[in-house]
Image (cartoon, rainbow, N blue to C red):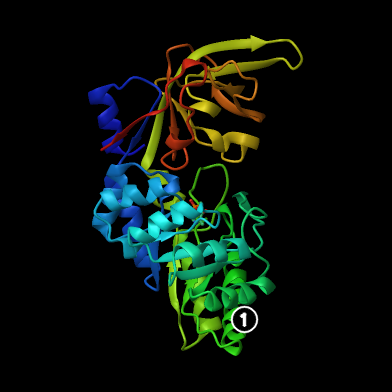
Amino acid sequence: MNAKIEQFFARENPPTPCLVVDLDQVAGNYAQMKTMATWADIFYAVKANPAPQLIGCLAAAGSSFDAASPAEIEACLAAGVDPTRISFGNTVKKAKDIMWAAARGIELFAVDSEGEVDKLAANAPGARVFCRIAVANDGARWPLSRKFGCGPDEAIPLLERAKHAGLRPAGLSFHVGSQQTEAQRWCEGVNWCAALFDRARRAGIELDLVNIGGGFPVHYGDEQIPGMASMLETIGRAMLEMFGDAQPRVLMEPGRAIVGSAGVIRSEVVLVADRTYGLAQRWVYLDVGRYGGLAETEGEAIRYRLEVAGRKGPMKPSVVAGPTCDSHDVLYENILYDLPADIAPGDIVTLSDTGAYTTTYASVGFNGFAPLEEYYI
Ligand SMILES: *Cc1c(COP(=O)(O)O)cnc(C)c1O
């Protein structure tokens, strides 16, 4: 936890559970990525955290935005973002939402199927489209494969269809899955894009946009991950090698890497119980859980760092669970967490690197627990 967030907690003592995000750190993360990848334009993936304060902060820093719905587009427009700096990157859109977005001045749309090409042609004539191809997601802690992306062989026929229907084929995109720790996955995507640019040219289509998606990892502390600088350098080198002198415009859509490390969730221990039924294990129940915003603990995919304030001394392996009456509301039970042996109800537990994919995943009030409170400082 950085000093600014620590001071906020000390000064305000906000009720738990809550998320605090340090906007200076968000701006710092953005600036750092921008410096490390001068060859790309950053389109922040709004779904990671759509808070207006955050969008305002990134807009001021010069970011563009990748939105998936009218509400996300509206949030960017409300922050004063020019519509030409917003892409409608969801490949599954309602016709009326496409029409609405086009009317608001959105120019860039994603497709990965014939049905979506036809919908765009009918509702946003003349729009620029990029085709999302499916690439390997191995190495990602939160994969996004299967649901999105066409096979590479389908991409050029789709873009031809788009052209014939009056759309403007702009380029290609791919997404290597979230919390991806292997730069090689992006390089494979870049290789595909270069090969498909050639095929497009032979089909009479000039592409000029490569969208390398998001997926850049946050250091949660439970595993070694490569540094951001070296990953981006590797990807930049792949662009140079594969496209040579004919460098296209490159977009990237980081979400997690921009905001994850800037947030801390403050939670309170509700109960500590030594269970003897089945496995003899100690259970620690927090006031935040799967339905309070920690959706990415599903399958223990994301293992947040937990710290208990004011306790030192011996540790004890513990199951960590949330407060609701749902048996899926268990955060960690396959790999136990070492928590202080004397942890007790009322203790403050902080969860680090929780700025992304938390607040909007919180249920509206399952079991009467309110959505996660959020502070942007
Ligand atoms: C979710 C998503 C992102 C952001 O992914 P991160 O892992 O948060 O960087 C970017 N692009 C698309 C299309 C997405 O669906």
Q: Residues within 10 Å of mark 1 (few under 14, many from 20)?
A: few
**Residue placed at 32% from the left, 61% from the top?**
83
Q: Nearer the viewer, residue 118 or 181?
A: 118
- Where disc 1 sits, the SS reads helix
Give residue 64's position: percent from left, percent from top. 34, 60
Q: Quadrant of the N terminus?
A: top left
Left or right, 334 with respect to 264, comes to right
**Residue placed at 42% from the left, 26% from the top?**
371
**Residue placed at 46% from the left, 63% from the top?**
109
Give residue 319's position: percent from left, percent from top. 62, 23
Give the amino acid type for the residue marked by disc 1 in the picture.
Ala
Query: Which residue is identified by label 1?
Result: 195
Q: Nearer the viewer, residue 323 or 280?
A: 323
Quarter of the figure with residue 272: top right
Give residue 100's position: percent from left, percent from top. 39, 54
Q: Quadrant of the C terminus?
A: top left
- Single out the residue that lies furthest toward the right: 278
Quarter of the figure with residue 250: bottom left
Give residue 89's position: percent from left, percent from top. 48, 58
The answer to whether residue 244 of the structure is visible from this angle is yes
Left or right, 45 with respect to 235, comes to left
- Single out the residue that lies furthest toward the front: 122
Q: Indicate whether 276 appears above or below 31.
A: above
**Residue placed at 44% from the left, 38% from the top?**
354
